Image: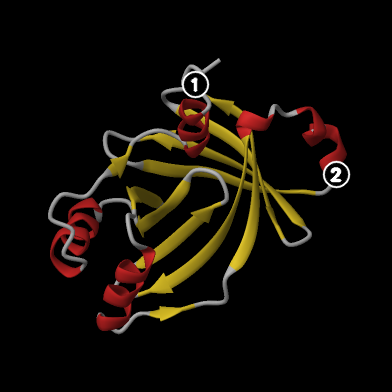
Amino acid sequence: MNELKLEIADPRIFETRLQQLGGKMGEPCWYGNWYLEATASRVLKIMQIRDSYRLLELQKLDKGFAFVSDKSINDISIYRLHKIPDHNILHKTVRSWQARHSVDLLVFDDIGTFACVNYEEGEYNTALDFILNDLHLSNPAFIEVPFNVLKRRKLGLADFD
């Protein structure tokens, strides 16, 4: 799966548009994210959903990101999450929608609200058409860096270590 990340100025307007498209929202869920490695081309992070932990690897595409690996973690202690610097830790509430496309509204405690429009390989143009024409976002603010980079920028840090 691939994703296009967008900055969302007003989540109420965005979700109203998803509803107008016949979209249905799933149950909101809290996620924890610990970034183990983030470069301009690759992201390796741990994601917590309820009591489950997963190791995710994402690769930077020309536009957006691709999920290349998603593995369940049985023993989280080996990752020493308590040693991860605060600027590489992000928590969010995810409001997942199904409206012609899978769309996740991400509400971060510390960096704002974003959306991820998810699409399968080879469907970039369809996802872009959905953003421009169905969601009526004529000038979308695409995010082309990992979310931890946005937090680092907010704290006045360099994008990458």
| Quadrant (top left, top right, bottom left, bottom right) of the C terminus | top right
Residue 75, numbered label: 2
Image location (x, y in percent) of residue 6 = 32, 50
Q: SS of the residue at dot 2?
A: loop
Q: Number of labelled discs?
A: 2
Image location (x, y in percent) of residue 1 = 42, 53
Q: In this view, does 13 lie above or below 106?
A: below
Which residue is the site of mark 1?
156
The residue mark sitting in front, 2 or 1, is: 1
Label 2: how many Cα within 10 Å (few below 14, some 14–19, many 20+): few
Identify the amino acid type marked 1.
Gly
- Looking at the image, which residue is at 33% across and 61% down? 10
N-terminal label among 2 and 1: 2
The one of 34 and 108 positioned closer to us in this rendering: 108
Question: Dividing the picture into quarters, in which one does residue 120 lie?
Answer: bottom left
Left or right, residue 73 beside residue 103: right
The one of 104 and 100 positioned closer to us in this rendering: 104
Left or right, residue 88 beside residue 136: right
Image location (x, y in percent) of residue 126 = 20, 60
Image location (x, y in percent) of residue 2 = 38, 49
- Looking at the image, which residue is at 85% across and 44% down? 75
Identify the amino acid type marked 2.
Asp
